Amino acid sequence: MTTSIAPKQTEVIHSPIWQAATWADYENCRDDRNAPERLRLFFHDGFLLVTMMGWEGIKHAEVGDLFVMLFAFWFNFHPEQTAKSLGGCLMEKSGKQAAAPDLVLYLGDNAPTWNKGEPRRIDLDKWAVPDLVGEVSDTTLASDLDEKKRLYEALGVPEYWVIDVKGRQVLAFQLQSNGKYQICETSAALAGLPIALLEQTLDQLAESTNITAAAWFMQTISQLIEPSN
């Protein structure tokens, strides 16, 4: 017999709480047809986090969309490299971990695809983990730097970004040979991209929109990178 593990709405908005749970609890929550449609689920080491997409607010949406645009502009200058963005998609390793990161980036030709009749999530027993995941941290910074960081370490995600909305900083981590994250100053997934440039782009939001900030980023990298012919 399982119990209800979904947090109250006020907890979802202001203070995400990881609750003790089994994998069966996670599956019940994932498969509950009466649950709100836009749940984000995270499971790791016997704890479950349930949040609701859409309650994060305007700043979260603004920054999340900004970074997807940054991905597009970056790879526009690297047409030789295939990339796919799947932000917000639920991914799971059966019986062990589950997560729905704000940003999900796959490089190369082995990104997950969906076929009719399959579950609408990324099966990490079938597909590789993403090359990069990121969390937009407006009200969730503590959890993103603690529980979620350990979750992505356990999954073996090579690169993890925590985008601090209020502090206008990007904390980027790369997985080391010991299975632990170490903070980095240059992205490996977006090879050669200085993390400081991402922070400078965030600074643009103080006086402009996310579309204008993305255009500033594109103009800046165009001066740093010679487009491939």
Image (spheres, rainbow, N blue to C red):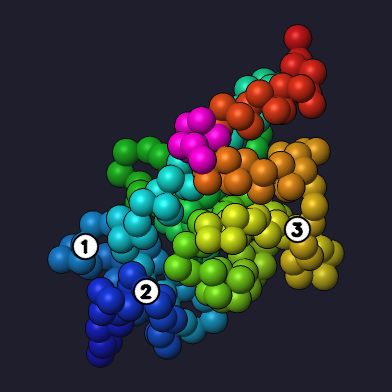
Q: What whole-number distance in Å separates the C-alpha atoms at marks 2 and 3?
A: 28 Å
137 on left or right of 78: left
Position of the N terminus, as image quadrant, is bottom left
Q: Position of residue 149 (x, y in %)?
A: 62, 69
Q: Secondary structure at mark 1?
A: loop
Q: How many marks?
A: 3
Q: Identify the residue under disc 1.
A: 36
Residue underneath mark 3? 174
Q: Is residue 25 above or below residue 187?
A: below
Residue that extends furthest to the front in the rendered view of this protein: 207
Judge whether 31 appears above or below 111 on screen.
below
Nearest to N terminus: mark 2 or mark 3: 2
Q: Disc 3 residue type?
A: Gln
Where residue 72 appears, as percent x and y from the top left, is 56, 30
First to last magenta residue range: 207-213
> Is residue 28 shown to the viewer in this render?
no
Secondary element type, mark 2: helix
Do the numbered discs 2 and 3 sit on residues whose CB atoms are within 8 Å?
Answer: no
Q: Residue 130: x percent and y percent? A: 60, 49
Residue 14, label in figure: 2
Residue drawn at point x = 42 percent, y = 52 percent: 59
